Amino acid sequence: MQQRMTRFSWVFALIALAAAGIGPHFAVSAQEQRPVQAPTASTYILGPNDRVRVKVYGEPDITGEYEVDSTGQISIPLAGHVRAEGLTTRQLEGAVTSALAKGIVRDPRVNVEVALYRPYYILGEVKKGGEFPYRIGLTVLDAVASAGGFTYRANENKVYLRRAGTSAEEVYSLDLPVPIFPGDNIRIPERYF
């Protein structure tokens, strides 16, 4: 009888703790504890599938939009293939200027800006998963809204996020805004109760 009362007490205590929101929680990666800095237009690192607008003053035949190909390069008339992956727009300006200066363009003045960011992807417990266009300042909740919102089965407390260029998913709590980067894969999990 004493053993039965002790077991009952433990069960009652666990139920009370669960009702109070205290109890076992899902393991969350260390990434959640550190704030992740979202890119700005000046700090954004270019990658494949980004589209850049290159303006060369006085050279309308060179000015235009160019897509970063799968090898990380853009192909510009009179400059040839210029490496863009891993560079900011300002660094790419310098690379294009150097490539054009080696050719027939004297004293090239170049401006580069991002015309279109590579997309992000969202799947799982959202109403309309898929590929969506990226914009600066995007968070996971913004991405969920773009995908039609959560389904009724969604776990609205956490998200699995695989950053572009990595193979491992990280778990983030949705208590704070989680920034999204171009090329990220977002997975909204199902809740189990």
Image (tube, rainbow, N blue to C red):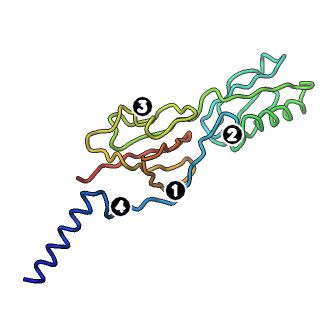
Query: Cα distance, mark 3 to mark 2?
Result: 25 Å
Mark 4 surroundings within 10 Å by alpha-carbon count, few (fewer than 14), some (14 through 19), many (20 or more): few
Q: Which quadrant would residue 62 be assigned to in this image?
A: top right
Please, is residue 55 above or below residue 7 in the view?
above
Residue hosting label 2: 43
Q: Which of the two residues, 7 or 105, is positioned nearer the viewer here?
A: 7
Going from the N terminus, do you reach mark 2 or mark 4 first? 4
Q: Which amino acid does label 2 sit on?
A: Thr
User: Badges 2 and 1: C-beta atoms under 8 Å apart?
Assistant: no
Residue 32: x and y in percent read 50, 54
Numbered tag placed on residue 25 in the rendering: 4
Going from the N terminus, do you reach mark 3 or mark 2 first? 2
Going from the N terminus, do you reach mark 3 or mark 4 first? 4
Residue hosting label 3: 146
Q: Which quadrant would residue 87 be assigned to in this image?
A: top right
Which residue is depicted at the point 11% across and 83% down?
Answer: 2
Q: Which image quadrant: the N terminus?
A: bottom left
Please, is residue 44 above or below residue 172 in the view?
above
